[in-house]
Image (cartoon, grey):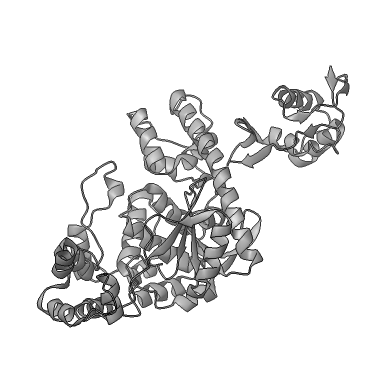
Amino acid sequence: MMFDDYPKQKPGIKSRYIGGETLLIDGELSYAINPPAAFIWELCDGEHSIADIEQAIREDFGVSPERSLHGEIVQTLIHFREKDLLVSHFCDYTDPD
Amino acid sequence: MLIELSACNADPALSQQQVNWGDLLKAVQYHGITGLVYDKLLKRNDPDYPPPHFQAAVIQAHRSNALQMIDKCEQVKAVLTSLIELRIKVVVLKGPAVAQVYYPQAPLRYFTDLNLFALSRDKNALDGVLNALGFRLEAGYVEPMPKLIPSVITHHHTRYEHRETKFPVEIHWEELLHDDLVPRDLDGMWRRAVSVNIEGLQTKTLSLEDHLLHLCAHAYHHRFDRLFRLTDLLFIVRDHSDEINWELFVNLVSLEEAQTPVYQSFSLINKLFGVALPDWVLAKLKPDGFRRWWHQHFFTPKVTRPFDMQEEIPFSFKSTPWFQSTFLNLMIMGRRPEKLQYLLRLLLPTPEWLRQRFNLPPERSLWPYYILRLMLPPKLMERLMRNK
C-alpha cells in the first residue's frame, strides 16, 4: 500500500466541531467524522508522522501499548485520501505486523 | 417528548410514547432545538428508538444547520474583529454569547443574527464599520422619532443586513427590557458586562444576572413561542445556578419592575422541565395577585400550543388598539407611572416630534395640530392624518 509518511491536510478545507462530530468542509462537499478521526485530522499537518499520531492517540485516549492502532489510523487516512482531503506525496507504506 | 429531547441532561433515557415522528421532527425544527435533540440521540446511542428514520433526519438536519452556522460564525467574527480593532465598545447579546457561555456545547445552539448592545455615541462609527464590511441598513429604515420622555424608547434597534449573505446585525441602543422602556440601570449593565470568547475573539457580554433578566423579558415578549428561548434560561438556571448572584438578580428585577416576565418565565420552566429557582428568590419575584390574574386570563404562552396560529393580543403600551394592548400592558407589566407620563405627553408632544410624526415642513404652524390633538384621542388623530 502506498501512503504518505507525514500526512497533510489539503489547503482550504475547513473543519468545525458540531457537538459530537466534526464536519470537514471541502467547498460544496462536507463530511462528518467522529472524535477519534477528528483527532487524527488535526494532526495531519505535515509535521506528524503516522507513528507520531499513534503515540498522540495513546497518550490522549489512554490506549494501552499492547493494542496496535496503526491499522486503524491508516484506515482513517485512507478514507481521508479517498475523499481527496489530503495532499498527496505518497511513498511506499507497509503495514507492520 | 419535545421536552425530554430538549433538556440536554446527562440522563439518556427517553420515555416510550406513541409519537407521530414526522410531526415531531417538524416541531423540533420549528422550536430551534435540533442541536439539542441531536445531542440527546448521540448520548442515547440506541439505534432502535427513536426509529432510525427519525434519528437520521435529526442528524442530517443538525449537520445541515451546522454548515450554515459556519458562514454565520465567520460573519460574526468579521464584525467583532473590526469593532475590537477600532476599540468600539459593544456587548454581544443572545445567540452567540448564550451558546458560548451557557450551553453545554456551543454548536448545539443556533443563531440567525448578531445582536449587539452599543452606545449611542458610537452610532456613526458602527455605521462606518458595518458599511465597510458590506452591510447596509435594512430597507425602509426611517430615523427614530424624538423621545417624548427620557425613559421611553423610540428606537428598538437598528438593523443591518449583509448585501450578499443577508446575515443580519441588530444594534440595540437601549432596548434590553422589551417593554419600550430604557433600563433604569443601563450604566450598571455596561459596568457589569463580562468577558467572553466568541470565535477566538475576546469581547464582552452581559453579566449572568443581566442576561437572565434580558432573556426572560425577550422570551416573554415573544410569548414563549419557541422552546429554544426556554432552554437558554433552563441551562443558565440548571447548570450555572451557583454562579448567579441571586440577591443582585432580585434587586435588578425589582428596580426594573420586571417581575411579571421573569416570574412567568421561571414558572413555565419549572412546569416544563421541573427546574425551580430557590424558594426565597421565587417569592421575591412573584408579582402581585392583580397582575397575576390579568396575566392568567389574557396571556397564553405559545409553547404550550405549538403551531396554533391564532392571532395574539398585541402587548405594547405604545400600540393600537388601546384596550387590548395598552390597557393590558398597564395591568400586567411594571413602571406604570412612566408609561402614563408618556401617554399624557402624547397629547402635547414636542414640536420636533409633531413635525417628524406628520412630516410637517418648518414653516407650517403647529397650533392646529396641538388643538386637534387635545380634542381627539391621539391614536384617532394619527389614523385620520394617515388617511389624509
Residue A26: image quadrant is top right
Q: Which of B344 and B338 is in front in this view?
A: B344
Q: Does any portion of residue B36 appear in the rendered image?
A: yes
Which residue: 77% across, 27% down? A73
Q: Which quarter of the picture shows residue B276?
A: bottom left
Residue in view at x 50 percent, y 39 percent = B65
State the image coordinates of residue B270 (x, y, percent, origin top left).
Answer: 36, 55
Q: Name the foreground residue: B357 vs A27.
A: B357
Q: Where is residue B325 in the image (x, y as percent from the top left)?
A: 20, 63
Q: Residue furthest top?
A: A1
Q: Is residue B94 left or right of residue A52?
A: left
Q: From the top left corner, tell me how far across and down residue B228 is, in percent.
A: 42, 49
Up-down relation of residue B117 to residue B234 (above or below): below
Q: Indicate left or right for A87 with B131 as reference.
A: right
Which quadrant holds the C terminus of chain B?
Answer: bottom left
The residue nearer to you, when weighing B255 against B4, is: B255
